[in-house]
Amino acid sequence: MAEENLVNQNALEAFTTLGDYLEEDGWFPQRMGDRFIYRMGFNGKNGRVDCFAQIRIELEQFLFYVVASVKVPDAQRAAVAEFLTRANYGLRIGNFEMDFSDGDVRYKSSLDFEGTELLPTLIKNAIYPAVQTMDRYLPGLMAVIYAGKSPEETIVEIEGDLS
């Protein structure tokens, strides 16, 4: 029981560190009720997105989600799934996800900090690649959804010909 309390204390301290970092870095986080999640927005070069920073208390994990501002219509979900799979290949930090039931697209970055302190540098190194990656691929996502562009062609335009 004492060991469990130590785990929870570490995670609670991580949530405080996360909130302090987000405030100091100008993210203007808003806590979501009594949950261990902050919500904030990010304005990139290619659009605005919602971000969610969460501490999984019981697992001592930090999850950061960047949610696209558009839901993928049902008819385009297969093409977007291909686009996201192609985009995921080779990404070093994080990955794209799509909920097939509602068309939500997000980018996820995460850290397991079990038994160690969640430092502000680790938080920064998880969130900035996530928002930058979503911003980089957002025009391609929109092109696949609304302009009917092929996923393969769109990825080549974003990443260059990698073959």
Image (cartoon, rainbow, N blue to C red):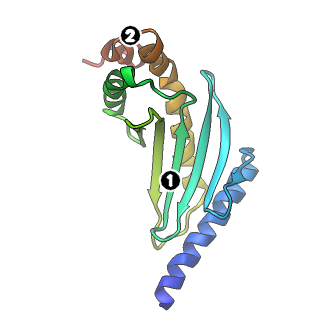
Residue 30 appears at what percent x and percent y?
Answer: 72, 51
Q: Earlier in the sequence, mark 2 or mark 1?
A: 1
Residue 63 numbered mark, or none: 1
Horizontal side of 80 relative to 27 (left or right) equals left
Under circle 1, the secondary element is strand
Looking at the rendered structure, the kind of residue marked 2 is: Lys
Q: Badge 1 local density, few (<14 within 10 Å), some, or many (20+)?
A: some
Q: Who is closer to the viewer here, 141 or 32?
A: 32
Do tag 2 and tag 1 residues touch (Cβ < 8 Å)? no
Q: Is residue 14 above or below residue 135?
A: below
Horizontal side of 119 relative to 24 (left or right) equals left
Q: Who is closer to the viewer here, 93 or 28?
A: 28
Residue 56 appears at what percent x and percent y?
Answer: 51, 63
- Cα distance between the residues tagged 2 and 1: 31 Å
Horizontal side of 46 relative to 77 (left or right) equals right
Quarter in which the C terminus is drawn: top left
